[in-house]
Image: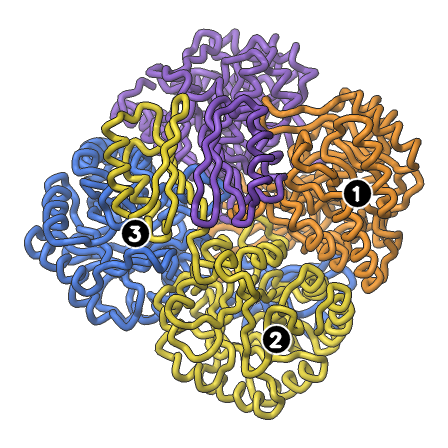
Chain colours: A yellow, B blue, C orange, D purple
Amino acid sequence: MIITLNEHTTEQQKTEIISYLKSYGVNISVIEGTMLSVIGLVGDTFSIDIKSIQAFHFVKDVQRIAEPYKKVNRMFHPLDSIVAVDGIKIGGDNPIAVMAGPCSVENEMLLDETAFEVKRAGATLLRGGAYKPRTSPYSFQGLGIEGLKLLKAMKEKYQLPIVSEIMDGNLLPEFEKYVDLIQVGARNMQNYQLLKALGKAQKPILLKRGFSNTIEEWLMSAEYIVTSGNSNVILCERGIRTFETATRNTLDLSVIPIVKRKTHLPIVIDPSHATGDWRLVEAMSLAAIAAGTDGLIIEVHNHPEKALSDGAQSLTYQNFAKLMEKGRQIAQVVGRKF
Amino acid sequence: MIITLNEHTTEQQKTEIISYLKSYGVNISVIEGTMLSVIGLVGDTFSIDIKSIQAFHFVKDVQRIAEPYKKVNRMFHPLDSIVAVDGIKIGGDNPIAVMAGPCSVENEMLLDETAFEVKRAGATLLRGGAYKPRTSPYSFQGLGIEGLKLLKAMKEKYQLPIVSEIMDGNLLPEFEKYVDLIQVGARNMQNYQLLKALGKAQKPILLKRGFSNTIEEWLMSAEYIVTSGNSNVILCERGIRTFETATRNTLDLSVIPIVKRKTHLPIVIDPSHATGDWRLVEAMSLAAIAAGTDGLIIEVHNHPEKALSDGAQSLTYQNFAKLMEKGRQIAQVVGRKF
Amino acid sequence: MIITLNEHTTEQQKTEIISYLKSYGVNISVIEGTMLSVIGLVGDTFSIDIKSIQAFHFVKDVQRIAEPYKKVNRMFHPLDSIVAVDGIKIGGDNPIAVMAGPCSVENEMLLDETAFEVKRAGATLLRGGAYKPRTSPYSFQGLGIEGLKLLKAMKEKYQLPIVSEIMDGNLLPEFEKYVDLIQVGARNMQNYQLLKALGKAQKPILLKRGFSNTIEEWLMSAEYIVTSGNSNVILCERGIRTFETATRNTLDLSVIPIVKRKTHLPIVIDPSHATGDWRLVEAMSLAAIAAGTDGLIIEVHNHPEKALSDGAQSLTYQNFAKLMEKGRQIAQVVGRKF
Amino acid sequence: MIITLNEHTTEQQKTEIISYLKSYGVNISVIEGTMLSVIGLVGDTFSIDIKSIQAFHFVKDVQRIAEPYKKVNRMFHPLDSIVAVDGIKIGGDNPIAVMAGPCSVENEMLLDETAFEVKRAGATLLRGGAYKPRTSPYSFQGLGIEGLKLLKAMKEKYQLPIVSEIMDGNLLPEFEKYVDLIQVGARNMQNYQLLKALGKAQKPILLKRGFSNTIEEWLMSAEYIVTSGNSNVILCERGIRTFETATRNTLDLSVIPIVKRKTHLPIVIDPSHATGDWRLVEAMSLAAIAAGTDGLIIEVHNHPEKALSDGAQSLTYQNFAKLMEKGRQIAQVVGRKF
């Protein structure tokens, strides 16, 4: 950690802050510049709150040198983490995981048909929402527990492990019973109560990036889950909020190589929610594979205009199968199974 | 609602979508352009999901004409809502409410001193965090229930109603017991489970704007609370995330006149969290008053460098008193008591 | 164009605005809602200024239905435009164009070596800056005209057409003499004087997207060049400014399928400037090819730490050759030559 | 400047970079951490290009400690700069300057009436565009030189110095003849050719912040003008681009206290362009005064719906006079004349 002091900082003030910093048990070096002085801290600075240092009125700036996360930091765990979802291994050199299915579970017949079709095209997990975070209280909010049961039934029928979003820590027992990979949605990425609860879960977690969260904040949220006891975390990029209005969000594919350098956790891409537009999903999926993603999560609905949510971003069975075919070839070029 | 169809939409497709739209019971007008056709919907379009219409592959674009919120919409409720917080009236022509106190409750002695000082300077409510949302799991997470009890004791001693943040719907009974104005933090603005729970609360709610949420999304979150049964909602702007790094967030003061036009709910400004820098708090507080705010929420800590959270943005007692003095004069110019 | 009127608009006001709108020679339809009225305009609305309509105080909102650009709009020109750069055809089904070379031209020996190496690896154009837009007046500003002459010499030696950035319309004669594809940098995307000047140029233009410009604004800038007389415009995405600080900018690859739908102009991706980090360039280049780009522009410098500008984002010869090899295979999967 | 090296950096690599850094003539300190090493540079680091250091592949991160600007840095020039515009002094304790007038100059009669009215209400400068940067090539582009002449005539009639935007350095002689304060628009903030040309001008410059530029970039652009020879620069905030769509841009009023700390140059606020909505202009103007602005620039047009540009954001004479009246009272509270 590097602390810069203002140009008129007195010797007494320097002594005051240095004595304060020593209480953290870190090593301290001082570099005197022409006008500004700099204090360097070495050691375990994870627990130091930057804002308490900035509160000294003669401090100009404080910058971290080391990342503020530890358990999910690749520096301390150089090998790729492999997360097993009911036997499907994700991360490392394992095949690219494809999670496909409807945005919301709507009824058994449709879910069954979709599960059959995505399995046939090569998907390895079934996604489907039973509890839906909707901007409007007047929108369809999901089938709830009935939805989870339908998903579980499909799992048994088609051997497709289930991915579904949890919004309420109180429902964790139900999710542990019916779901194989518990998703934290973008809006809950910094719902720390939920993250702590999921740290106690016996199932792996798919942690979506908040649509306005930095990569560092995202990894700090993963750190919450891991420090609470659950090290099976998969990251999922689903687009960030920018000024551009031509897409719902801007899919940030550069996170793939960045995240792989900063952390050992696997990374999955969600082109459906990022773009909000089925016409962009194939191109963005292929791009994600070329960039090295460990997985994809894709919405599929054969009658998008009748979907109870997010129809505009869903692929038909046929378009999904086409995407899978091309994806397989791109994966081969970058040395991955699919 | 206005639906634009692509240039090669067939008559059959038009018939198909019109028949679909009629199922919503709205009136339909069609305008034929040179290349594009436009369908206008009139009536109660609140429950129509834009994305299901966009899912028709020949639809080019869908735009709402009316706002998607109803209960919090000023169009339907032209008069200002007044929210009473344990007798303190906020909104309309009532005096500008000043909520002041430490970021986190740390100990009784300090809280008592702070409550005494902010009361003396003119604050009308006492703020203090007992449960703190922290980016890092290694940071101080708040005193919890003990913090709430300390706040309640101060309320009784100084007649200052209490504002504190809730992060977990399960704690609502405790918050209803100890707190007068229950705050929803920026990170939970779209935690719909929590919003629905607060819709059942007997206490008013301070709903902070998510740091990356549009005004429309913010009002939709207020709509969640109101439609769930609690119409005592106060909005709070605390800065939005932008590319600028000189401040923590960018305080968007234009929300004051905008929100007053769009909704009847009161609006409060939080310059401390927005800027993250105590040196900017006075200027931004005065600006907020000049722009017509109904209230301010300000962090005060007399030894900011010893604060367990957010010291960098806290005012000392002296600086807070100075701000109150100038604020009073600005308020007078814009015709408000303070 | 759709104009929404406020709920209390009088009949007289409606008559006033309708008579105003009729002066533009467009057809007008009125849809009366419960509270709001909507006016639809059909015809040539390109020349109507939205802000002059918003200036009527009873107007609630104005939205365009048709895009505000005409010449670059695919709706009016369904076939792909092919832009020839000194014989190299870009766009449509033509091979993916690779423009490679140093950020800045530094000296002849290095440029010669780089040109030789990128040519050998398969690049089809040579890029190099002679006039550099630098944030700091204290940074290297480029070799100027000498740089252009060196580029021209390399072109003759290696048969590599030249791409270089123009910052000043007064230098157009020199650029037309020495350069084959004249680049408009991101900071000048809305320098309309320069765009108009380039509309008179005899050479094709590479128009970079401003780092905070929407796709629509970008196409409007292309429209400036085309309406001024030069229809040989290639678009270039180089990342947009977002809140994320892990990369210099966020590369928005979804522009590839979007731009191909909205316009007939070719699109090229610049992963070097977007990410600012050579370690991300390969992944993002492969992703761009998978997403359907018509070209790439990549910085190559064999001693990045000695580069006079932007060393951090430059590939070595070896890394560039490796990227070309993989790129060729991805291109094959998506049906493009390389 | 602080350079952090990766965990596996060898001694040889350290020697290599240290010897490279010594070539800049700065003093070097090394702090060895547990895993990372840090190199601190002290001295004149202005001319060091961060990106060339990042190009060393074992460098993890580079951070500046001192600001990269010198001439406009308050650290080196503690006293406020006062900029005189044809005798009107701006900055320091001088009265708040009000620049008012139409977006575009349209015709003599209207300009005369507007000049008369804004003067009567208390404006001290007349603003008006003769060359207009318009997103669409189909929009009104301004009267050009005729517009400048009309402005000059009004200046003589009403003793109102003239502010007008330059878009082309070739027109500098005309601007020096007709205009008193030459404005650089937001889109040209990083048009370095233009900035260098204006560094030779005999007239003061109003430098608008680019709508997506950081405060640091803005000050670097001011540094371009000052290092080129013209130290009479006034900064102007006009809103930044964010995800919010309820306003054209988000007015960032926190720049006022920030800019005053970082630089000695005066700062002016443009609420008209920032919000794009006349209904927000009064509130934002009063807020700017309360926050300590040195000036305002406001669009006034008595028939906004007939304005050839930007009518939606223009105040009528009556609304402008009302704003001036309240502004005077707010100014008094914060100790400024108006």
Q: Are marks 3 and 1 in contact (CB under 8 Å)?
A: no
Q: Are marks 2 and 1 in contact (CB under 8 Å)?
A: no
Q: Nearer the viewer, residue D305 or C30?
A: D305
The circle drawn on residue B266 is: 3
Element at label 1: strand
Q: Mark 2 belongs to which subunit?
A: A
Q: Which of the 4 image quadrants contains residue C210?
A: top right
Give the residue type at disc 1.
Ile
Q: Mark 1 belongs to which subunit?
A: C
Q: Say which residue appears at 22% left-offset and 31% top-offset.
A: B326
Which quadrant holds the N terminus of chain B? bottom right
| Left or right, A193 with reference to B114 | right
Q: Dot 2 corresponds to which residue?
A: A99
| Left or right, D121 with reference to C225 | left
Q: Nearer the viewer, residue C138 or B302?
A: C138
Residue C174: x and y, percent? Answer: 83, 22
Residue A35: x and y, percent? Answer: 39, 22
Element at label 2: strand
In 3D space, how far apart are the residues under numbered discs 2 and 1 (Cα atoms)?
37 Å
Q: Say which residue appears at 43% left-offset and 37% top-offset.
A: B246
Can residue D207 be seen here?
no
Residue C160: x and y, percent? Answer: 88, 37
* In the image, residue C125 above or below residue B53: above
Give the residue type at disc 3.
Pro
| Left or right, C297 with reference to C19 | right
In 3D space, how far apart are the residues under numbered discs 3 and 1 (Cα atoms)?
50 Å
Q: Dot 1 corresponds to which residue?
A: C234
As drawn, which residue projects farthest toward the left?
B157
Residue D148: x and y, percent? Answer: 62, 15
Q: Is the residue marked by circle 2 packed among few (<14), some (14-19), or many (20+) residues within 10 Å? A: many
Q: Nearer the viewer, mark 2 or mark 1?
A: 2
Can residue B337 be seen here?
yes
